[in-house]
Image (cartoon, rainbow, N blue to C red):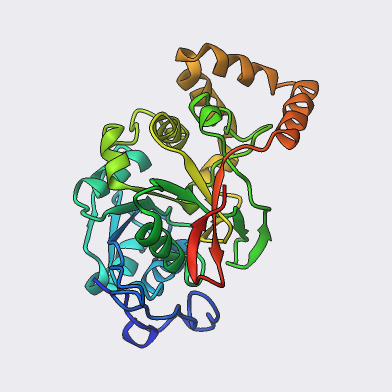
């Protein structure tokens, strides 16, 4: 399905302006000027009682102007008006359901099980894509898909009102360090989940699931499994942003996230050692200095002269 135009969608709530309320991305053709077809991108949104942010998330996906989108919402049986919001946008959804589930990761697995896109991602119901974000994703995979199996954009952050309030510098991710579980948020930082996309071939290769036995760190586990088979390419562009607000699950339960990380690393002696090292200030300083001195990871950037995405390292 192609993404709808702004005029085709229901009007935004009164007083809402800017992205993603009154702005829209450029409508892209099905086939690029190079004759390359835009790969289908499947995006899953798991949601439960997130009516405050859900509509902005939905519109940030539907207003991407992308010609081959498959958008799926898996709601956990919300009682706060979320279902009414979903129904407003039902004509542009490939699939949706609202029923009790076992949590966020169970919902994600349900969504991916009914998806068909060559490229996959999930976007939580309080995060958003930026304007023209999927144009970047589609362009990279249509041009470099034989070489690139998963990508992540520059980390960015929305505030509670939906203002883009912080953008990090480009970070590269070393595959061996991903496998060891080093990107768990302390000395090495995180791999920003909402900005990360991957091929269905890679998803199938690692078993085709996120670990629904976890409650907080299943993305960390998925990245480690991906890292066994493919390099992560950092994209020198903003694709999406993480919304910071007081009710965010990770903000309230960060200690439980790290408990799951440590359990996940129990089968990795080196990973557990590094995890232990970065728990103290001196260890973090040593690791951070080593990271700054040792160029790692791979990236892609846009070549304005050639008008295409290229691998830069």
Q: Which of the 4 quarters of the picture holds residue 51?
A: bottom left
Horizontal side of 222 relative to 185 (left or right) equals left
Left/right of residue 286 with respect to residue 61 in the rendered view? right
- The count of marks equals 0
Q: In the figure, 126 relative to 6: above or below?
A: above
Residue 48 seen anywhere in this rendered image of the structure: no
Q: Quadrant of residue 281?
A: top right
Task: Please determine whether, in this image, residue 263 is positioned above or below residue 84.
Answer: above
Residue 289 percent coordinates (x, y): 78, 31
Residue ranking furthest to the top: 269
The residue closer to the viewer here, 30 or 16, is: 30
Residue 246 in the image, given as x and y percentages of width and height: 61, 50
267 in relation to 48, above or below: above
From the top left corner, tell me how far across and down residue 293 is, in percent: 75, 34
Q: Is residue 291 above or below residue 265?
A: below
The residue sitting at 47% across, 71% down in the picture is: 132
Relative placement, left or right, of 60 versus 173 is left
For the N terminus, give its image quadrant: bottom left
Point out the residue furthest to the bottom here: 7
Q: Position of residue 209 (x, y in %)?
A: 29, 36
Q: Is residue 236 visible?
A: yes
x 48%, y 14%: residue: 266
Q: Nearer the viewer, residue 158 or 4?
A: 4
What residue is drawn where x is 43% and y is 59%? Answer: 140
Q: Quadrant of residue 134?
A: bottom left
């Amino acid at each position: 399905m192609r993404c709808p135009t702004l005029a085709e969608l229901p009007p935004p709530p009164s007083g809402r302006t800017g992205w993603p309320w009154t702005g829209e991305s450029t409508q892209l053709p099905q086939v690029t000027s190079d004759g390359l077809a835009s790969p289908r991108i499947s995006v899953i949104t798991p949601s439960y009682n997130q009516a405050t942010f859900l509509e902005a998330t939905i519109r940030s996906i539907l207003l991407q102007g992308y010609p081959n989108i498959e958008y799926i919402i898996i709601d956990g049986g919300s009682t706060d008006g979320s279902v009414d919001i979903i129904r407003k946008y039902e004509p542009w959804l490939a699939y949706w359901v609202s029923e009790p589930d076992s949590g966020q990761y169970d919902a994600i697995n349900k969504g991916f099980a009914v998806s068909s896109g060559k490229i996959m991602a999930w976007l939580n119901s309080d995060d958003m894509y930026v304007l023209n974000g999927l144009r970047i994703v589609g362009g990279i995979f249509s041009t470099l898909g034989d070489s690139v199996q998963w990508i992540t954009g520059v980390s960015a952050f929305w505030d509670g009102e939906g203002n883009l309030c912080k953008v990090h510098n480009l970070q590269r991710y070393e595959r061996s360090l991903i496998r060891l579980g080093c990107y768990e948020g302390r000395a090495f930082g995180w791999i920003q989940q909402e900005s990360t996309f991957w091929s269905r071939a890679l998803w199938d290769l690692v078993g085709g699931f996120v670990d629904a036995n976890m409650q907080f760190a299943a993305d960390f586990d998925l990245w480690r499994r991906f890292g066994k088979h493919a390099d992560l390419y950092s994209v020198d562009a903003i694709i999406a942003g993480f919304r910071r607000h007081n009710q965010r699950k990770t903000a309230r339960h960060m200690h439980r996230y790290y408990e799951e990380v440590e359990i996940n690393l129990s089968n990795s002696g080196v990973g557990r050692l590094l995890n232990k090292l970065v728990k103290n200030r001196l260890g973090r300083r040593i690791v951070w200095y080593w990271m700054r001195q040792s160029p790692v990871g791979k990236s892609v950037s846009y070549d304005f002269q050639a008008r295409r995405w290229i691998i830069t390292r």
